[in-house]
Amino acid sequence: MAKGFTLEVNPFVYLAKHTGGNEWREQYVEKPHLTPKEEAALNNGELTELLAKRNSFPELPLVNYTTQYGMGCFEGLKALPQKDGSLKLFRPDENAKRMESSMAGLMMPVYPAALFTAAVKKTVALNKKLGFAPAYDPEWEKGNFADGHSVYVRPFSYSEGAIGLGISKHPWVVIAATCVGKYFESEKPSAVTTDMIRATPGGTGCIKCDANYVAATLAKKRAEAAGYMEAIFLDACDRKYVEEGSSCNIFFLLKSGVLVTPELGDTILPGITRKSILVIAADMGITTEERRISIEEAMDESKEVFVTGTAAGISYFESITHKGKTARFNGGRMGDTTRELLHTLKGIQYGAEPDKYEWMFDVDK
């Protein structure tokens, strides 16, 4: 069974090297593999050895701006199995635009969006032909696809060899894929605020760069050690306004019926699932607001709370704890609005609902 994230990289990996001007030298590398059935029969030692070979790239320099200083960026998107046996990508054009923005923000040559979308589709398609893709399971429908499997695609930039403070002038873009399942595994979907700061005004919080995830990971692991599923970051200046979770945007359905999510700025990542939920909610007749919301208002006035992201999908919180005070929402159960949003989003992604927004891209076309 696929887990949230594993390092079981699929055999075909894409590499593109910036060679000057607007030129990128592309290649699809087929790494060592057996059939999925044969790999499933390997013992742990044999599988570990095979996967290590698949994750080895001696052509990429070890010492560079990315490994030494975090000067890199990445994306995450999914290809989801459909009832007809095909795979479809969810809004890869949006990921392509965000990757462009992130690379520009790090002052490196921009990887063109057209190359991004085509390379993601072909990488997933090549692996699918080898059998490295999940099949649609009708059982997923019973839980609004919360347990659905998919192909997680990870495009990322990687600097040329270098040492010292500098910017990448001839980076690589690598695209790898792995099969994944449910992201959050906690039986208690609760959150706690953290004293750590994810991003500061004037920084890199709004681009998907590597360095942003250090504080986010530490805060999440501290929250998990304390018995919570997720950590919630507050703003760096006033320490009272909600910003986002460790790797996800956050929404509050207030008692008034208004759905609020923190407004975008230079400290909040413009999530693609976040953007999609705002569209779906508006079509459902829900009033949506993108604005600052204090942790006090969020805890006192919310009747449902959930987070969104490529990995998280839509995941609800039963409670939030802040400075020793805990607020519970909807009796600790997923709310009706959250469930309807989840049903619609996942239904579109897995082909159970009409794709009226034209968000899904066929991998094989």
Image (cartoon, rainbow, N blue to C red):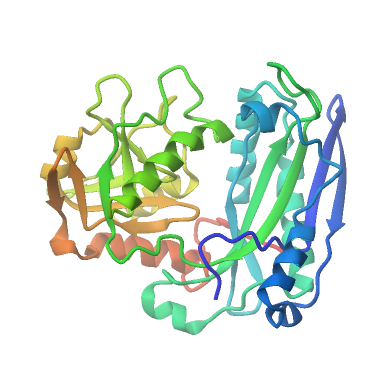
Q: In this view, does 228 lie to the left or right of 126?
A: left
| Residue furthest front in the image | 45
Determine the image quadrant of residue 114. top right
Image position of 44 (left or right of 365): left
Q: Please name whichever residue, 244 or 189, is drawn nearer the observer in this view of the structure.
A: 189
**Residue at horizontal 70 percent and vertical 37 percent from the top:** 157
In the displayed structure, 250 sits above or below 235; it is: below
Residue at x 72% of width, y 79% of height: 42
Residue 202 rendering spot, x and y as whole percentages:
46, 17
Query: Which of the 4 image quadrants contains residue 82?
Result: bottom right
Q: Which of 361 and 197 is in front in this view?
A: 197
Residue 150 in percent (x, y) is at 57, 67
Residue 61 screen position, x and y as percent:
81, 36
Q: In this view, does 204 lie to the left or right of 65?
A: left
Quarter occupied by the N terminus? bottom right
Residue 212 showing in the rendered view: yes
Q: Where is residue 314 in the image (x, y as percent from the top left)?
A: 38, 57
Quadrant of the image for the C terminus? bottom right
**For residue 249, above or below residue 90:** above
Evaluate whether residue 288 shows in this view. Answer: no
Front residue (pair 96, 165): 165
